[in-house]
Amino acid sequence: MKKTIKLLPVVMTFLLAACGNKIEPGQTEVTRESVGGLPFAVVEAQEVPGQDLFIGSIESADRGVLAARIDGRVGRLTVQVGNPVKAGQLLLIIDQNTVNDRLVEAQGGKEAAAARLDLAEKTYQRYAQLARAEAVTPQEMDRVSAEREQARQNLQAASAGVAQARTGVAYNHVIAPYAGIISEQLVESGSTVMPGTPLLVIERSGTPQARIALPESLVGQISLGETLQLEVPALLRTVSGVVTEIQPTSDPATRTFTVKLSLPTDAGLTPGLFLRARRQATTGSALLIPRSALVQRGQLIGIYVVDAKILHFRLVKIGQQLGDKVEILSGLSAGETIVTAATEKARSGARVEE
């Protein structure tokens, strides 16, 4: 007990000293970077033409499925999905040993058939001489004649087998029929294939088209030859597409019709890109900002908002593009102030100089 009483004043003194050095909240000043020369604008809701929105993707108008012409095992794949290929380029090899073995076997069968025909021909000639001397019966002559004819047919069949085996040797190398991009790989090395087994899908370069899903409620409102505006978010571009095909039946799972549109060949569009198609509808209101205000960071899109003279980077979701402006679907409210251009100079947390 006495030992504890002696230590107490020391502890209390230490605690009082610690409390005396406590920093009051809000006393530390934050040093901020200053940024000047940035253009600003207050976001306001504007009337815009209403539009129907459809989603889809870009594909090649010329899309081919390469299939096996012989049976065997896939020996080697020389390409992967996404690889560009040239016309005549080797894409895949089907086990060559199996094909060569069949050719050797077919050639051996042909040689044996030729030997049997030679024997049958010689036998027939001997019997023919005996027949002229009436040394054999007509039935015996008919038999050797039939054997000779059968040997001839067997040789023809063996020759056809050799030709087929040689074709198989040529078919074990699968080559690109035209320049394009490999969009699907349907087999792996070691896979067993038969004639008709799909191997690869190749899409011809320079023939892009759009495929969109059209709701059943709008199928009668779009016609062949109609032009739709197509947005490609990955490229931040808008291109025009002309309706070339409307499939007559709908997908029972999604209740949509497939619509295909031709695209400009010089737009740098590659198969697989996501797109949005828009069509004029009723008028409505939306938040529109200059496209120059957008900042893209990887797959994310944002803007710089000014609040109490401090810059804040904020992610937004964009909608339709109207000329040099873009619709903001979420992440921004009317009345807020944003940086409209020169965003490369903006820094989140920086103070704005007037």
Image (tube, rainbow, N blue to C red):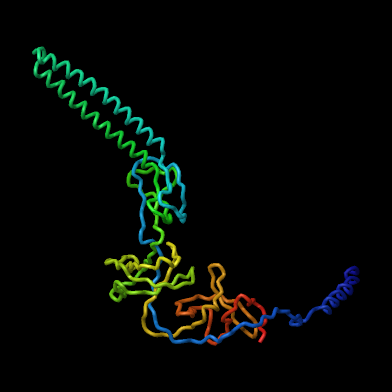
Q: Quadrant of the C terminus?
A: bottom right
* As drawn, 285 above or below 98: below
275 horizontally vs 256: left or right: right
Q: In this image, 318 relative to 264: left or right?
A: right
Residue 255 seen anywhere in this rendered image of the structure? no
Which of the 4 quarters of the picture holds residue 243? Answer: bottom left
Q: Quadrant of residue 277?
A: bottom left
Where does residue 72 sit, x and y in percent of width and height? 38, 40
**Quadrant of residue 298 in the image?**
bottom right
Position of 271 relative to 338 (above/below) = above
- x, y (%) of residue 336? 56, 85
Q: Nearer the viewer, residue 323 or 315?
A: 323
Reply above or below: 167 against 64.
above
Residue 15 in the image: state x and y as whole percent.
84, 75
Residue 204 visible in the current orientation? yes
Q: Is residue 301 left or right of residue 133?
A: right
* 156 left or right of 341 in image: left
Q: Nearer the viewer, residue 9 or 28?
A: 28
Q: How many marks?
A: 0
The structure residue drawn at horizontal position 65% and vertical position 85%, both measured from the top left corner, is 309
- The quarter in which the N terminus is drawn is bottom right
Q: Residue at x 34, y 30 (%)?
A: 105
Residue 24 percent across, percent down from the top left: 77, 81
